């Protein structure tokens, strides 16, 4: 066992063998040997050995524990349940084995059996937790039941009765048990009863979370629309802590609800269960003013009361009544707020929410008013006034961010924008002085200046200034050198490099972000969207693996979380874990990565290192099966991960999100159907008795062609809806969701090529069933398809021609679309070759039959059907075309190597000396990345050329 723990599996196997020589029947040694075998990749031997032991139904703890570890590593948790079922039968009173059995069921989600196991445990050892495990399993049955009715009429009421029994017998001990009771009542929509539980004696046990009782009461009051109670409770909680924002929201919600209902307090009695109620605007105004007065006496400044006043003004304006309550002018209030909190980084985000209270005519005045109160000093009249300490720097940064948000920078012309960039960079470099003592992992105080300068340059780039984008990269690389762990710099670099078509620097940047766990789903798209489409096949494989590893381990990990939740009685977390697991399983990104990874593997290996049939078999792909949950796809991408300070009309909107999800889903459908069509090719090429249709139906092959034809119809439909979608010509914000590859796929002709290749499959199949004698028409049709395919592929190649990087007026311009077209060309030619090899497998037997006939008849002039010439010409032309593309790629490599970037005169004197070195680095990275892409594409095409040469019949 020690050897296993140290990872020395071979020694572990040897030691186990020694032991087994002495004691032939030592179960535990066998299992430990099996673990060693499993870890050295001998899965089958390990499994056989484990089953040998399991068949003996062991009851010793060591063997059971070791088998559990082994089955977990084999990803076969269902075998653990069988193991403990047997053990429990033999040792019926063991508390330990029963609880292991319960946990084994929890791993595989067998809720009904968990309920039974929990009760069995409670009978052996009457401990409360076991009883409530059983109750929770009932709730889980109700959550997982497809039939809503069943869960409300059977599972939940049963769970409720079980808890009530314990309440009546006064056996409720722990907080978790009260939580569980509350959870059942809430799911049964018995809000009144739930409220009574929380407010009653049982509620006293709810102590582990801050304000746990109050929060639960509030939730129930809202469900019951008991606004007086909501109001009184939130008022009371705000008196305790006037900085708790959620209670301000409830307070305002309830006040306005009461006003709309014209509520008045009952005479003589308490206002409500929770005490005094505010039911008029006057009371609300007075209450907020009092909170502000109170705040001025507090030892540390609190933001809540001031923001609450702005929130109240916003709500009153929305209702069309503001001025009569004399709450003050929002502009003045925000100015005062800035004076109080301007040196805190949160000041900008706090005010951002309320800027729409300002009239646009006041923006410039408001900004100058803020600038006046910041202590900045200039050494000379003409110089920029700079902050003397971090506090002033933070205040100034806040104003700059607000200016960007209010659109002041957007309104500038080119010259003003360039001036602003220079000033921001000057402030950025000056601010670095304050951060000299910062650690590598800390951000520099002035980083946002640099980021804002880059945003201004991005504006210029989108307006057609080619040079600006290189300056963006230069400034970001400089920023990163001073602040190596600034994720915003890295994310923006990733987006810009990808826009320019350079993937090589991105892989390193993404790795340095050190994305953890769920981030593979939320920001993984930044990597997987571009790796393959820019020709970095190896990096694409790797980035898909990162993501898939996370998604696959999520299954295993979630089971462990659920088991821990049972052990510690954190019942309310269990449904959350299950929802989390489901959300990840139906993640859009997961489906995309699965599909693209398989297409990529076929592209790199099928008919090169293994046959197409073997590749598809190893992925257990079949054209009939579709494992993508189309109806439940969840877009988990974080589209706001990049900071920006754009005004609402330029920022990413809900509409953009919706459109992006729609586009991603359409593209995924096209890719998934393409993959399934390719996976159907090997199923067709089994020998078929021609003309005898009864037999072919039995062989199941004719149904295979039906599958292919049905998939082809679906592909046509998906392509049509994709084209309709693109007609809308949607422009996402530059930092919003990246568009899919769909537009390029349609415009460069790959789509038409690939579709006609699948139609060709259908024709060849028909030829195969009809034979060569009376199929002149089909042969003619196939011949024409071959011709038009070669024309289409040549067109596609023409769209790949041109310089990838060109130097124009001393500025670099990249053409990533040419690179993307090349990648599509490689994919399309690969599909053409897979279809050709199917064609080859159909024609070879025909040819050898004809040659046999020739020998029999001893005639030299048996006419060869035209199909053979058509096919031969087609394959020859494919070979010529591929050779031409390979030559073109060699040419590109030579040009890229010869491109002397140093000689670029960067005419813009904006760049300082130190910036020039970063510009060199950046351009070098882009050049090297393009070189790398072209090399990988060329290598792959050479391998494909070899497979064409084998196709000569």
Image (cartoon, helix red, strand yellow):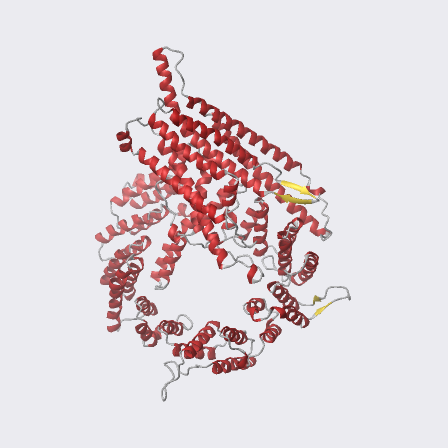
Side (left or right) of 503 relative to 622: right
The extreme bottom residue here reads: 268
Residue 463: image location, x then y, percent: 63, 53
Residue 173, position in %: x, y? 30, 71
896 or 444: nearer the eye?
A: 896
Question: Could you say which is closer to the camera, residue 316 or residue 307?
Answer: 316
**380 lies above or below 48:** below
- Vertical position of residue 873 compared to residue 44: above or below: above
In this orientation, which residue lies closer to the viewer: 340 or 705? 705
Q: Is residue 540 visible?
A: yes
| Position of the C terminus by quadrant | top left
Please say whether residue 532 is visible from this viewpoint.
no
Residue 832, horizontal then vertical, whole percent: 46, 32
Relative to the observer, which residue lies in front, 704 or 915? 704
Q: How many marks?
A: 0
Q: Which image quadrant for residue 278? A: bottom left
Task: Give the quadrant of residue 779.
Answer: top left
Q: Where 266 falls versus 573 (above or below)?
A: below
**Residue 492, percent across and down?**
58, 53
Q: Seen in the image, is 78 located left or right of residue 784?
A: left
């Amino acid at each position: 066992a020690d050897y296993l723990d140290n990872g020395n599996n071979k020694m572990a196997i040897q030691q186990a063998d020694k032991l087994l020589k002495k004691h032939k029947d030592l179960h535990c040694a066998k299992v430990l040997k099996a673990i060693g075998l499993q870890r050295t990749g001998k899965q089958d031997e390990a499994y056989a050995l484990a089953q040998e032991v399991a068949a003996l139904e062991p009851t010793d703890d060591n063997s059971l524990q070791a088998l559990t570890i082994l089955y977990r590593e084999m990803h076969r948790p269902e075998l653990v349940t069988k193991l403990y079922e047997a053990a429990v039968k033999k040792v019926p009173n063991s508390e330990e084995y029963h609880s292991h059995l319960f946990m084994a069921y929890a791993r595989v989600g067998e809720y009904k059996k968990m309920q039974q196991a929990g009760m069995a445990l409670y009978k052996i050892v009457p401990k409360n937790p076991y009883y409530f495990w059983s109750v929770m399993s009932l709730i889980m049955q109700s959550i997982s039941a497809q039939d809503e009715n069943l869960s409300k009429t059977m599972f939940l009421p049963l769970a409720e009765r079980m808890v009530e029994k314990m309440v009546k017998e006064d056996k409720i001990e722990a907080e978790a048990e009260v939580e569980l009771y509350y959870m059942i009542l809430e799911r049964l929509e018995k809000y009144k009863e739930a409220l009574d539980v929380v407010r009653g004696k049982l509620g006293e046990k709810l102590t582990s979370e801050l304000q746990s009782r109050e929060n639960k009461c509030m939730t129930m009051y809202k469900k019951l629309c008991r606004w007086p109670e909501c109001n009184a409770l939130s008022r009371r909680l705000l008196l305790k802590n006037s900085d708790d924002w959620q209670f301000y929201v409830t307070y305002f919600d309830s006040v306005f609800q009461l006003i709309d209902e014209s509520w008045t307090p009952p005479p003589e009695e308490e206002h409500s269960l929770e005490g005094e109620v505010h039911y008029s605007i006057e009371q609300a105004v007075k209450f907020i003013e009092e909170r502000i007065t109170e705040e001025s006496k507090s030892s540390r400044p609190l933001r809540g009361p001031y923001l609450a006043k702005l929130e109240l003004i916003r709500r009153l304006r929305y209702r069309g009544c503001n001025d009569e309550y004399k709450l003050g002018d929002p502009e003045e209030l925000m100015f005062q707020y800035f004076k109080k909190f301007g040196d805190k980084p949160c000041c900008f985000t706090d005010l951002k929410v309320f800027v729409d209270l300002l009239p646009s005519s006041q923006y410039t005045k408001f900004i100058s008013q803020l600038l006046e109160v910041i202590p900045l000093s200039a050494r000379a009249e003409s110089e920029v006034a700079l902050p003397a300490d971090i506090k002033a720097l933070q205040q100034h940064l806040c104003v700059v961010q607000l200016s960007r948000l209010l659109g002041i920078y957007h309104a500038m012309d080119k010259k003003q924008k360039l001036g602003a960039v220079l000033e921001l960079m000057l402030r950025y470099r000056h601010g670095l002085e304050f951060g000299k003592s910062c650690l590598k992992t800390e951000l520099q105080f002035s980083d946002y200046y640099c980021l804002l300068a880059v945003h201004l340059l991005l504006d210029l780039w989108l307006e057609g200034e080619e040079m600006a984008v290189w300056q963006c990269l230069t400034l970001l690389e400089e920023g990163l050198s001073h602040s190596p762990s600034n994720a915003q710099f890295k994310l923006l670099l990733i987006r810009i490099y990808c826009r320019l078509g350079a993937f090589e620097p991105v892989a390193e940047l993404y790795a340095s972000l050190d994305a953890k766990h769920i981030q593979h789903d939320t920001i993984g798209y930044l990597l997987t969207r571009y790796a393959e489409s820019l020709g970095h096949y190896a990096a694409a494989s790797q980035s898909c693996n990162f993501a898939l590893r996370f998604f696959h381990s999520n299954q295993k990990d979630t089971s462990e979380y659920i088991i821990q939740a049972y052990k510690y009685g954190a019942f309310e977390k269990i449904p959350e874990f299950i929802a989390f697991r489901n959300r990840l399983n139906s993640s859009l990104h997961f489906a995309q990565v699965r599909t693209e990874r398989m297409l990529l593997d076929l592209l790199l290996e099928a008919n090169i290192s293994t046959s197409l049939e073997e590749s598809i078999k190893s992925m257990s792909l079949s054209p009939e099966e579709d494992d993508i949950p189309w109806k439940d796809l969840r877009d988990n991408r974080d589209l706001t991960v990049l900071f920006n300070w754009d005004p609402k009309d330029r920022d990413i909107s809900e509409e953009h999100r919706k459109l992006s999800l729609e586009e991603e889903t359409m593209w995924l459908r096209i890719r998934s159907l393409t993959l399934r069509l390719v996976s159907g090719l090997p199923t067709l090429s089994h020998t078929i008795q021609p003309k005898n249709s009864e037999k072919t139906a039995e062989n199941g092959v004719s149904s295979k062609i039906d599958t292919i034809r049905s998939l082809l119809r679906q592909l046509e439909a998906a392509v049509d809806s994709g084209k309709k979608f693109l007609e809308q010509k949607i422009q996402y914000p530059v930092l919003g969701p990246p568009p899919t590859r769909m537009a390029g796929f349609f415009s460069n002709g790959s789509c038409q090529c690939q579709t006609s290749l699948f139609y060709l499959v259908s024709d060849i199949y028909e030829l195969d069933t009809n034979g060569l004698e009376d199929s002149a028409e089909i042969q003619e049709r196939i011949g024409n398809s071959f011709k038009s395919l070669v024309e289409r592929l040549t067109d596609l190649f023409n769209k790949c021609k041109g310089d990838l990087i060109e130097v124009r007026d001393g500025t670099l311009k990249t053409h990533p679309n040419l690179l993307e077209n090349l990648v599509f060309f490689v994919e399309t030619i690969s599909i053409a070759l897979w279809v050709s090899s199917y064609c080859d497998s159909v024609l070879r037997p025909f040819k050898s039959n004809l040659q046999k006939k020739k020998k029999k008849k001893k005639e030299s002039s048996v006419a060869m059907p035209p199909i053979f010439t058509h096919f031969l010409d087609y394959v020859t032309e494919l070979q010529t075309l591929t050779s031409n593309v390979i030559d073109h790629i060699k040419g590109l490599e030579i040009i890229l190597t010869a491109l002397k970037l140093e000689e670029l005169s960067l005419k813009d004197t904006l760049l300082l000396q130190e910036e020039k070195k970063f510009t060199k680095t950046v351009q070098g990275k882009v050049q090297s990345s393009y070189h790398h892409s072209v090399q990988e594409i060329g290598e792959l095409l050479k391998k494909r050329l070899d497979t064409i040469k084998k196709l000569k019949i």
